[in-house]
Structure formats: C-alpha cells, structure tokens
C-alpha cells in the first residue's frame, strides 16, 4: 500500500456537529381558524439538532448516534395519528422534547411553517430553540 503524499492536518472540533432535517412536508390537521378545522393542510418542518461535545468520537467508539430518521418518523407518526393541533407551537415543543430525549443531542432548533396560508409568503409559523436544563 502506497502512503499518501498529503499529510494529515489533524482536525479538531470547532463547534457542535449538527444533524439536519430540511423541508419535511407532512399533511396535518392544524390551526386555530374555523376554516382550518376538519381538514388537512401542508406543514413544513425544519430541524437542526446540535450534538454533544466529542460527538464524532462517541459515534466512532460506541456506534450510537442521533438519528434523523427517528425524528422524521416521530413527526410523520404524530401527523398520521390524527387529531387536530391548534398551534404550530405545540408541534415545535413536542419535537424539541422528543429530540432532546436523546443523550447525544444538546440543543435543537425546530421550525414549523404552514406554506399555503398566504399567497405572498413562502410560509408562516414559528422557530423555537431549546436545550437541556
């Protein structure tokens, strides 16, 4: 085996690793307006999960990790279970709580938007950032 002429530069962490879920579109019953009740509408989810310090080492040494698939499944299951949700804030808090139950997640930003409410806006909603106490 030939050794590479490029020397390793020795990388170090410079902030948390971030697991991303972008533009997940899910049909859900949500909203406080009478016109939003009894029907599904598109809801878009963006989630940024900051990991604990030393995350890449933990993954390498233990094989445990923060799964974006688990979070996507949580969101999709919540929508499929049905039931009307009044506020996007409720969704955001539920997702944040689920994500932070993973010991390797230290902070999460959740953005929940409804893209079809105003013709002139790409979406309206909320973005929350939460961390463990």
Image (cartoon, rainbow, N blue to C red):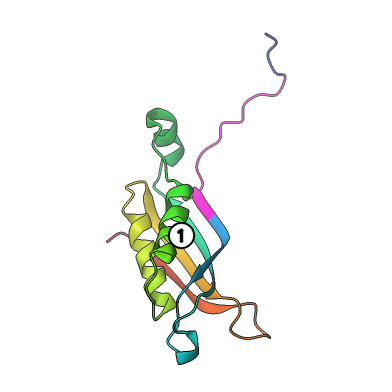
Location of residue 81 (image quadrant): bottom left
| Residue at the farthest left position | 133
Front residue of 54/95: it is: 95
* Residue 16 visible within the image: no
Quarter holding the C terminus is bottom left
Front residue of 104/47: it is: 47
Local crowd at mark 1 within 10 Å, few (<14), some, or many (≥20)?
some
Q: Is residue 131 magenta?
A: no
| Residue at the farthest right position | 5
* Residue 28 visible within the image: yes
Residue 102, placed above or below residue 45: above
> Start and end of the magenta stretch?
5-20
Q: Secondary structure at mark 1?
A: helix
| Residue at the farthest bottom position | 34
| Residue at the farthest top position | 1
* Residue 129 position in % (x across, y down): 42, 67
Which residue bears the numbered disc 1? 76
* Residue 96 position in % (x across, y down): 38, 63
């Amino acid at each position: 085996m030939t050794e590479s002429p490029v020397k390793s530069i020795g990388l170090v962490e410079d902030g948390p690793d971030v697991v991303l879920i972008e533009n997940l579109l899910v049909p859900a019953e949500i909203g406080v307006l009478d016109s939003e009740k009894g029907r599904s509408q598109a809801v878009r989810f963006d989630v940024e999960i900051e990991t604990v310090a030393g995350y890449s080492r933990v993954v390498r040494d233990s094989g445990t990790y923060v799964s974006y698939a688990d979070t996507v499944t949580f969101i999709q299951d919540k929508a499929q279970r049905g039931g009307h949700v009044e506020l996007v804030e409720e969704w955001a808090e539920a997702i944040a709580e689920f994500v932070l139950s993973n010991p390797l997640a230290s902070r999460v930003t959740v953005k929940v938007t409804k893209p079809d409410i105003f013709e002139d806006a790409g979406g309206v909603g909320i973005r929350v950032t939460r961390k463990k106490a």
